[in-house]
Image (tube, rainbow, N blue to C red):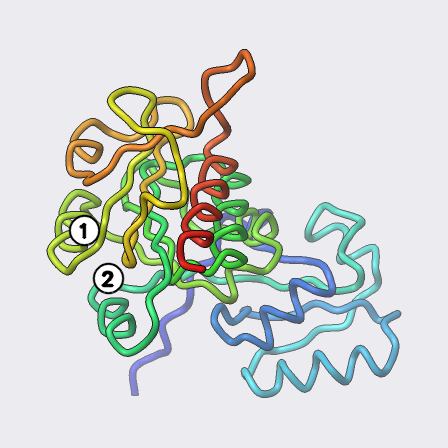
Amino acid sequence: MPAKRKQKLAGNHQKCWLWGRHLVTETMISGRWIPRKLILSEELSQTELTQIQTAAERQHVPVELAPPARLKELCRSGEHQGYVAQMPEFTCLEFSEFLKKMSAGKIGPLLILDRIQDPQNLGAMLRSAEVLGASAVIIGAQEQVGVTTAVARSSAGAINHIPVVQVSSLLATIRRLHSIGFQIVGTSLAESVPLSADLFQSKVAILIGNESTGVAPELLEACNLRVRIPQSGQLDSLNAAVAAGILLYAVSLSSK
């Protein structure tokens, strides 16, 4: 019988840890991203230990009890609340798998991210996408931060509830979505119309670009619609995560 392949960690030894009562418990219960092991404070109450150990047994996750100082050492944070999980690499959904699932249910907006590099931004976008009813977040394979434990923490647990699809070519993916009836909406200050809720069709994919350079020209060219967010301040742009939240909210208004 072949040996079981060892899972890679989600980053190096110091970057593979999730911590905090809510995030670790929700991650365990959701079963989407199963930890390699849990390290729990030996000072947790029996009720807390029973709850998390029961979830761990269902997922066949080993549990270790340790002093709070050990948990702080592992995650380099005193905010662990007695819960630390060692995480494997996150597995994104294949685009073909997502299309099959999408055809079987109600379709919300899609959020397509072009070369987002800040984990805090990606986490915030995942959170907005989940809260505002998106069906998935689609990311590329190049120049794009993946789903890390830092992203998971920034998403406030949203990573456990919204599909993340990774594709080798964003351009090919956009063209495929367009061919099956999606309106592709890109953000741009040039040759664009002011954002309003009445612009959107029933099937929408929102494209948000890199924090510094925006949407790549070839992707912007493939959009059906280019919008800009009206602004009255002195700055000429918004943080990418903020822009994503505003557009998703506008789409949510259009569907009511």
Dividing the picture into quarters, in which one does residue 84 lie? bottom right
Distance, label 1 to label 2, CA atoms, is 8 Å
Q: Secondary structure at mark 2?
A: helix
Crowding at mark 2 (Cα within 10 Å: few <14, some 14-19, many 20+): some
Residue 114 percent coordinates (x, y) = 31, 38
- Count of marks overlaid on the render: 2
Give the label on residue 220, or none: none
User: Closer to the N terminus: mark 1 or mark 2?
Assistant: 2
Is residue 236 shown left or right of residue 58? left
- Tell me if residue 201 comes above or below residue 234 in the rendering: below
Quarter of the C terminus within the rendering: bottom left
Residue closest to the far top: 234
Contact (CB < 8 A) between labels 1 and 2? yes
- Tell me if residue 76 comes above or below residue 240 in the rendering: below
The structure residue drawn at horizontal position 75% and vertical position 57%, both measured from the top left corner, is 71
Residue 171 percent coordinates (x, y) = 17, 43
The residue wearing badge 1 is 173
Q: Between residues 141 and 186, which one lies in front from this camera angle?
A: 186
The structure residue drawn at horizontal position 49% and vertical position 38%, both measured from the top left corner, is 241
- Tell me if residue 84 comes above or below residue 49 in the rendering: above
The structure residue drawn at horizontal position 50% and vertical position 29%, both measured from the top left corner, is 239
Q: Amino acid at mark 2?
A: Phe
Q: Amino acid at mark 1?
A: Thr
Residue 155 percent coordinates (x, y) = 56, 52
Quarter of the N terminus within the rendering: bottom left
Is residue 150 shown left or right of residue 143? right
Dividing the picture into quarters, in which one does residue 4 lie? bottom left
The residue wearing badge 2 is 95
